[in-house]
Image: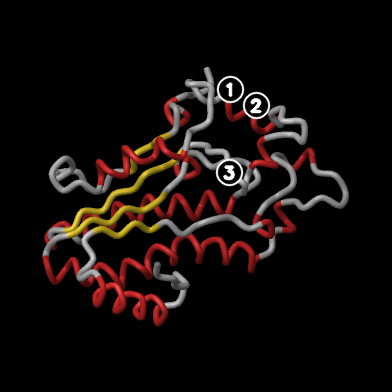
Amino acid sequence: MYKANVLDPAALEEVHQQVLKDLGPCDILVNGAGGNNPRATTDNEYQHEAKEGQKTFFDLDASGVDFVFKLNFQGTLLPTQVFAKDMVERKHGCILNISSMNAYIPLTKIPAYSGAKAAISNFTQWLATHFAGSGIRANAIAPGFLVSNQNRALLFNPDGTPTARSEKILKGTPMGRFVDSEELLGGVFFLTDDKAASAVTGVVLPIDCGFAAYSGV
């Protein structure tokens, strides 16, 4: 296992050299770093519902917003700068980024995360164009809503019933359920397969139980 801070170019290059020594040049790069921060999140979906003492849009911490953008965008850009060098030299390789449902339509409460993931989708298309003549494909998956330890308390009450926000998500999902993490694998394997997806680049693939396709009507 290799460990590195995705926001530290020197640490990334150190890991790059270790990988070269142990495994050889990079063929597939999956940029999986990302996340949100409470300092960049509002307490209410709508400003007119805000109550005294709650964090509103006007209370968002600039450093928290900056952290979210750095983690998601630079945390994708910097590893790509380091590892895509191998691909350029060999004129072969695949980059897979992790976008989000937020990139299509921003979710309430999390403006920084939504904006950062929109940037990832845009950056994926940019990479696909920039490296097209170098034999490198660049795509992304956009996972739907998964239940994890990070968001479990937001989606379920202590008694196991869905929260109001969770109910909204499920009502807006045609398949009426959350995505299982293993359901992401098919898209990942397809997009990183040079034979099956040889002509696929610049694509952001939703794996979302239909969430991005539903207008709510």
Query: Disc 1 vs disc 2: Cβ atoms closer than 8 Å?
Result: yes
> Where in the figure is residue 67, as x and y percent of width and height?
57, 66
Q: Is residue 197 above or below residue 63?
A: above
According to the picture, the residue beneath numbered tag 3 turns out to be 148
According to the picture, the residue beneath numbered tag 1 turns out to be 171
Q: Secondary structure at mark 3?
A: loop
Q: CA distance from mark 1 to mark 3?
A: 19 Å
Earlier residue among tags 1 and 3:
3
Q: Amino acid at mark 2?
A: Glu
Closer to the observer: label 3 or label 2?
Answer: 3
Residue drawn at x 53%, y 25% is 177
> Where in the figure is residue 135, as x and y percent of width and height?
13, 59
Q: Which residue is at the front of the view, 40 or 199? A: 199
- Residue 167: assigned label: 2
Residue drawn at x 26%, y 48% is 202
> Where in the figure is residue 176, as x and y percent of width and height?
53, 21
Report the side of 160 relative to 205 (left or right). right
Q: Is residue 116 above or below residue 106?
A: below
